[in-house]
Image (tube, rainbow, N blue to C red):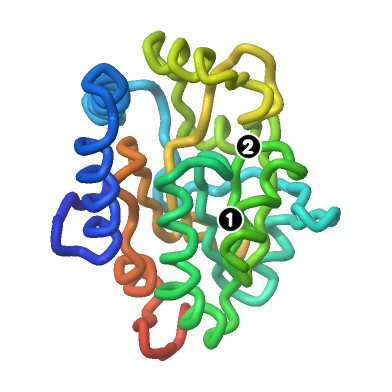
Amino acid sequence: MTSSNALSPLRTKFRALEDERVRTWSAEALAINVNQRRTLIDEHGTAGHVVQENDVLPETSLPTIDGGTISLDTLVAKGPAVLVFFRFAGCPACNIALPHYRDTLWPALSAAGIPLLAISPQPPQALAEIAVRHDLPFPVASDTGLAFARSLGITYVFDEPSRQAAVSKGGNSAALNGLEETWELPKPAVVVIGRGRVVRFVDVSPDWMDRTESERILSALGLTQRGASHAA
């Protein structure tokens, strides 16, 4: 799980979003959100295997929002790759995290020739929105049906208050993950894989408002935000 250091750059952005919600949301809506996140934190690590360092990921190909496909084997053909799992295009926290990674993570990765793939279970046609909105320079792929995220043990199911709140706003499960009535999403996660799809670093965030800082990812790769030394 990520550190909740309020002084870290990404956490500071999330704190501003939380403060805004305290000012503008009803007490009931705020409690539903906070209680769901607290439950996920309390239950983290107790519901079966979650991907770990040195695991070998399954051979996987995912559709990208531009109509193509991308495989893990292609990503690691020349060295390590970074996988960033996020919830869905309309998720406010994801709309903070992905442009943050664009600005603070991607430049060093690009300079070092290390690919980054952002992954959500949302169907590609809906998922394209977040890539266009933030002019993301890295590919975005759909894990529609959650097969990949489930294989890593990183998904969660909405609690009943969260499900009811989503339905009351006109939401439906299939729009989020391509599945009817599952109300399941990935916990935000960063997974660094090397040749052979071997996991070299993993950080799963049960609280979607507390995600992996860019510095930790770059450190795991032997890089800095100013540039690259080299990645093993």
Q: Quadrant of the N terminus?
A: top left
Query: Could you tell me the amino acid type at mark 2?
Result: Pro
Q: Residue, x 60% and y 43% (percent of image)? A: 120
Element on which disc 2 rests: loop
Q: Is residue 42 left or right of residue 139?
A: left
Extreme right residue here?
67
Q: Mark number for residue 6?
A: none
Dot 2 corresponds to which residue? Answer: 121
Vertical comparison of 25 with 60: above or below: above
Q: Quadrant of residue 172?
A: top right
Residue of label 1: 118
Which amino acid type corresponds to the residue marked 1 in the rendered image? Ala
In the image, taking residue 209 as reference, residue 110 lies left or right, namely right
Please tell me whether mark 1 sits on a helix, a strand or a loop. strand
Q: Residue at x 31, y 44 (%)?
A: 209
Within 10 Å of disc 1 (Cα), the crowding (few <14, some 14-19, many 20+) is: some
Image location of residue 34, percent across then percent down: 25, 27
